[in-house]
Amino acid sequence: MLTDDASQRLTQVRDDIAHAARIADRKPEAVTLIAVSKTHDADAIRPLIAAGQRVFGENRVQEAEAKWPALREETPGIELHLVGQLQSNKAEEAVTLFDAIHSVDRESLVTALAKAMDKQGRRPACFLQVNIGDEPQKGGCPVAELPKLIEQARAADLPLAGLMCVPPLEVEPAPYFALLAKLARDHGPGGLSMGMSSDFPTAVTIGATHVRVGSALFGARA
């Protein structure tokens, strides 16, 4: 029954992505669905894996370390993305565990990640997080400082995959997604990690290449 529920939710989200992509004259396969499994245990994640989902996102290194090594052993081919804030002192663990890191937002983290990648010979894709709504409580590089951060990331030879944002809550997200898309066009890194359960179809119509969907796939968080 749990697998049926997971399969239905996954089908619905994929259908919504495909519909939004068609509206924007894009191919649905150009959008990577990241199932955000933060706060959900292995038993809640397995039904989605059984339903065919292979790309997952976690907010915290420690939580991911506790559940994903065993899950990945059970099912080879899982791709794991870090979508939450990362402390520089956790850079090494993050590079070991994740295939992509969506929250690179400052020079000290760029330096820590470059050092960890050189040490391990492993190079997860990196998205630069932009504080698109200029909110003091949120992580992300200020818009005005993005060109400098891109320069620093390129100088450190980080594998830049694109930009990421979390728009302000309870306002129309489209202008913020459009601004991120413009920043990507102006400055080069092509990927756009934007859109969550409440607004991912809008993000897809504006060019999202990665959407980070939690509750629409897992139900409300505990």
Image (tube, rainbow, N blue to C red):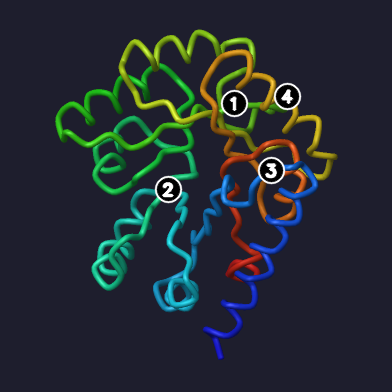
Q: Earlier in the sequence, mark 3 or mark 4?
A: 3
In the displayed structure image, the side of residue 92 where residue 151 appears, left or right: right
- Amino acid type at image mark 2: His
Residue at 70% over, 50% down = 200
Residue bearing mark 2: 81
Residue bearing mark 4: 179
In the image, residue 152 above or below residue 7: above
- Which element is circle 2 on? strand
- Amino acid type at image mark 4: Leu
Measure the C-alpha gap from mark 1 to mark 4. Answer: 10 Å
- Amino acid type at image mark 3: Arg
Q: Earlier in the sequence, mark 3 or mark 2?
A: 3
- Which element is circle 1 on? loop
Q: Residues within 10 Å of mark 1 (few under 14, many from 20)?
A: many
Measure the C-alpha gap from mark 2 to mark 4. Answer: 23 Å
Residue at 63% over, 32% down = 137
Circle nearer the viewer, 3 or 2: 3
Circle nearer the viewer, 3 or 4: 3
Marks 2 and 4: CB-CB under 8 Å? no
- Amino acid type at image mark 1: Val
In the displayed structure image, the side of residue 192 where residue 16 appears, left or right: right
- Which element is circle 4 on? helix
Picture coordinates of residue 153 (x, y %)?
39, 17
Circle nearer the viewer, 1 or 4: 4
In the displayed structure image, the side of residue 174 where residue 107 appears, left or right: left
Residue bearing mark 1: 130
Q: Earlier in the sequence, mark 2 or mark 1?
A: 2
In this rendered view, identify the residue nearer to me: 122 or 62: 122
Measure the C-alpha gap from mark 3 to mark 2. Answer: 23 Å
Res. 26 mark: 3
Q: Residues within 10 Å of mark 4 (few under 14, many from 20)?
A: some
Residue at 22% over, 30% down = 116
